[in-house]
Image: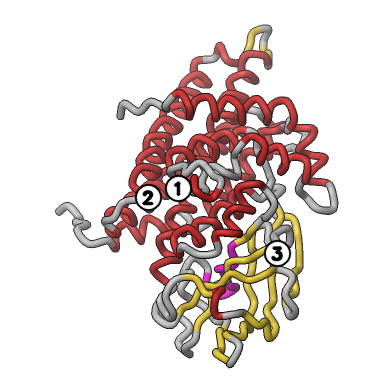
Amino acid sequence: MDFKLTQEQQQFAEAIRRWAEKDYGFEQRKHIIGSPKGTSSKAWSELAELGATALPIPEELGGFSGSAVDMMVVMQELGRGLVVEPYFATVLAAEFLKKAKAHFDVLEQIATGEKKLAVALAEKQSRYDLFDIATTATPNKDGFVLNGTKTVVLHGAQADMLIVSARSNENQRDKSGIHVFLVDANSIGIHRTDYRTIDGYRAADIRFDQVQVAPINMLGKENDGWELIDEIADYGVSLLCSEAIGIMEAITAATLDYLKTRQQFGVPIGKFQVLQHRMAEMFMEMEQARSMATLAAVKVSSANVEERRRTLSAAKARIGQAARYIGQQAVQLHGGMGVTNELPVAHMFKRLTTIELSLGDTDHHLARFVAQPGFKVSA
């Protein structure tokens, strides 16, 4: 695939990379992770100043109307810098508002960096089946009342507003009867338990106890929220694939640098042919993954739903395989130091592992790929 970035995309990528290297280095990141909030208000403001928060927002709302390919460029650089700010959670939530063509004021506030959002879809029993929803939305004279618990909501405690899925029928795994709401995170009845994940990010379990939501805060059509969730989950997969490429580039570069400087028997260990072969295999895995991430960014906006699902699942599965292989090789080639928190490699491997498990792991997406119409097993 002959795929070249535009001049604007290259400049945007370079600006994010310079910022990450200068103002979000490894030591700064460790300090942020160790802080009570786990994120940096200063870093968030700087991302907004760079235009990262405005990139996916429509131009008429103060943004740049960035495409999924534009977002791919940013996510790669944020991945390379191991940035732990709530960017992914916020832009994924923004996509719900864009698709629903609602709450333009919130989109404007996202563009300027005033609002941070999170997406509360998963529950303890649902695993990767986001249609498996026990949280209920009960109609009343003022709209709906939400009751239930969402788990592992990425940056849920740092968000000002939440995208929440709930259902109006009793069939927990029915794809009909699902609603999607925009909810003020500080509403009465919302209880958030914040914690740090293995990759240094923040997540929260969120309990909804008789939370009142106005009718205007329902996104999309009543009882028909699944198609919206399914489409935007694929958009999230595309973002994660792009982030993984940036991390794989960084971890491969760090490993190559280590092989050039670590000496054994009086020579750099990178001189040993067997290690050169392993580096070559890491590079090939990375390039295959990069092609799939690019294809995912191009196809995620496809009007053909089957093509979108097939492509995104193929990309997530292939990138999950590559991430595991590259991460394991990098740790092994660094020796015992590869698993210590003193080296960026360990943090990169943890984040790659978490990405592989987010929005469907490799096995889940292989099964989804096979389940798409048109798949044939060769005799």
Disc nearer the start of the sequence (3/2): 3
- Bounds of the magenta span? 119-126
The image position of residue 73, as x and y in percent, is 50, 35
Residue at 60% across / 33% down in the picture? 80
The image position of residue 46, as x and y in percent, is 71, 37
Q: Which residue is mark 2?
A: 300
Identity of the residue furthest to the left in this view:
379
Evaluate if marks 3 and 1 touch, with contact meaning CB atoms under 8 Å apart.
no
Q: Which mark is residue 238?
A: 1
Identity of the residue furthest to the bottom in this view:
141
Tell me the chief SS of the magenta region.
loop
Q: Which residue is mark 3?
A: 204
Q: What is the crowding at mark 3: few (fewer than 14 residues within 10 Å), some, or many (at least 20)?
A: many
Q: What is the crowding at mark 1: few (fewer than 14 residues within 10 Å), some, or many (at least 20)?
A: many
In this view, 199 is above or below 6: below
How far apart, in angstroms, are the residues tagged by discs 3 and 2? 28 Å
Residue at 70% across / 64% down in the picture? 204
Secondary structure, mark 1, is: helix
Disc nearer the start of the sequence (3/1): 3
Identity of the residue furthest to the top in this view:
266
How far apart, in angstroms, are the residues tagged by discs 2 and 1? 7 Å
